[in-house]
Image: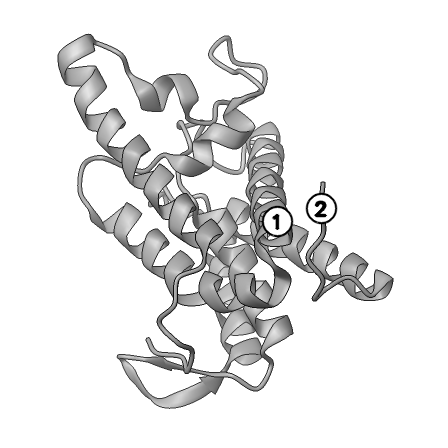
Amino acid sequence: MGIGINTYTPPAVKNIIIVNVLFFLASIILPKYFNLDVIYLLGLHYFESESFNPVQLLTYMFLHDTSGFGHIFFNMFGLWMFGRAIEQVMGSKRFLLYYFVTGVGAAIVQEVTWMFSLQPMMVTVGASGCIFGLLAAFAVLFPKAEIFLLFIPIPIKAPIFVIIYAVIELFAGVAGSGDGIAHYAHLGGLVFGLILLFIWKKQGKLYDDFNF
C-alpha cells in the first residue's frame, strides 16, 4: 500500500520498532540457549490462569510469532507506514501514550473475549491492536489521505479503508475462523484509539505535545 507522506522516521516510531526487533530476537535466542520461553512468560494469558501476570498487558505487544517473519514484518511495516505521520502531528510523547493505550485496550478486549469463550485461550502476542489504533488515528487526522492497496488498483480514502478493514475483522471474529488471530483484540485497539482521540479532540489537545 502507499500513502503520500515523507520518509522521515520520528524517534518514538523508530524506538518502538527497535524494541520489537530486540524482543523478537530474544524470543528466538533465549529459549534455545537459556531455556527461557519469553513468549510464554511475557505473552498475554487469560487473567484467571496461573501463568497470568499484569505486566503481560504491556509486554505482549512487543512480542511476535517466531515461526516466521511475516507477523513482525507486517506489524512493523504498518507502524512505520502510518505511525510516522501520526507522531509528527501528535508529538512523540502523546504518540507513545496513544500507542500504549490502544495496546492495553486491545489486551483488555482479548481478556473479555476469553471470558465469554469466544476464542481459544492461546497465548496472545503482537502489536496488531496498536496498529489498528494507528489506523484509526490516521483516518481521523488525515481524512482526505488516500491509501493504495496492491490488489485494488484504485485509491481508497483512509476513513473508508478503516471501516472496511474493521468490518472484515468483525466478521472474522464472529465467524470464529480458528485462524489463531485475535480479531476482537484488533477491534479493541481501534475502539480504544477512537475513544482517546475523541477525548483529546474535545479537550483541544489532539495536536499538542505535552510533558509528563
Question: Whole-percent x and y of residue 203?
Answer: 85, 61
Q: Quadrant of residue 109?
A: top right
In the picture, measured across the screen, residue 2 lies left or right of residue 194, that is left
Question: Whole-percent x and y of residue 91?
Answer: 60, 59
How far apart, in angstroms, are the residues tagged by discs 2 and 1?
Answer: 7 Å
Of callouts 2 and 1, which one flags the residue occurring earlier in the amino acid sequence?
1
Question: Whole-percent x and y of residue 51?
Answer: 47, 12
In the picture, measured across the screen, residue 160 lies left or right of residue 97, that is left
Give the label on residue 188, or none.
none
Q: Residue at x 59, y 53 (%)?
A: 95
Residue 23 higher or lower than 3, as above or below: above
Residue that numbered label 1 is attached to:
93
Question: Whole-percent x and y of residue 131?
Answer: 47, 55
- Given residues 96 and 171, the one toward you in this image is 96
Q: Kindly give the residue lying farthest to the right in the view shown.
A: 203
The quadrant the N terminus occupies is bottom left
Instruction: Categorize mark 1 by other alpha carbons within 10 Å: few (<14), some (14-19), many (20+).
Output: some
Instruction: Categorize mark 2 by other alpha carbons within 10 Å: few (<14), some (14-19), many (20+).
Output: few
* SS for dot 2: loop
> Disc count in the image?
2
Q: Amino acid at mark 1?
A: Lys
* SS for dot 1: helix
The quadrant the C terminus occupies is top right
Q: Residue at x 42, y 26 (%)?
A: 43
Residue that numbered label 2 is attached to:
211
Is residue 73 in view?
yes
